[in-house]
Amino acid sequence: MSLLTEELPDSVVFGGQSYGVKTDFRDWLRFYECAGKRDPVGMLRVYRRLPPSLEKALELAAEFGRGGAPPYGEKRPAERPVLDCEADAPFIYAAFMSEYGIDLCQARLHWYKFRALLAGLSGDRPLVRLMNLRSMDPAAQSDSRRRAEIRRLQRIYACPDRRTGEEKDADAMEALGKFY
């Protein structure tokens, strides 16, 4: 799908049937908040009418949520998140207002447009600098003081850990299992 040459979608197709989805960026930010909380019922709120298969509905919603952008080769999942739309909301708002003159509290913006504008923010925006800091690999620094400083800043500005206690315990057990 090309953002510039095709109409922006407002539905997904399952079994030859079209199922309308909400397209406002706020609905999709909520979708990802619910995904982070492992709340499939909340994730399904992006639909105007649900497909018959809830599993397929979630899969199609996730595909729509990726914004229709073509992949640029192999991408490894990030070890740690670099953006948390809830915690970083003031930075996102300020970036859109200063760079594009878009007041996100008032704007009606299709999810695909929001994603494109977010990706196109210039590197001097505090949000972009924050995301760059979060994505840095301290080990790539040759100076030990610089590595320590990056790690310190990454701890301070890390995205909130939204896992439940049980999920944290399970992840810790999995990590320990790799040593034995």
Image (cartoon, rainbow, N blue to C red):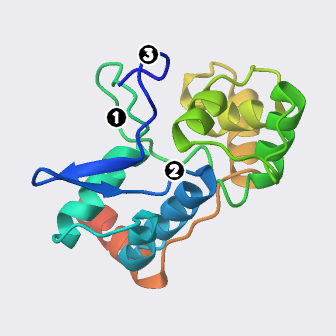
The tag on residue 129 is none
| CB atoms of marks 2 and 3 within 8 Å | no
Q: Determine which residue is flagged by label 3.
A: 5
Give the image location of residue 70, x and y in percent. 34, 24
**Can the viewer see residue 150 in this picture?**
yes
Q: Determine which residue is flagged by label 1.
A: 76
Residue 131 vertical position relative to residue 11 in the rendered view, above or below: above
Q: Badge 3: few (under 14), some or many (20 or more) residues near its Cα, within 10 Å?
A: few
User: Looking at the figure, which quarter contains the C terminus?
Assistant: bottom left
Instruction: Work out whether mark 1 precedes mark 3 in sequence or the reverse, and give the earlier one.
Output: 3
Say which amino acid is labelled 1.
Answer: Arg
Q: Badge 2: few (under 14), some or many (20 or more) residues near its Cα, within 10 Å?
A: many
59 on left or right of 48 = left
Residue 162 vertical position relative to residue 145 in the rendered view, above or below: below
Residue 133 vertical position relative to residue 35 in the rendered view, above or below: above
2 on left or right of 24 = left
Which element type, helix, strand or loop, lies under badge 2? loop
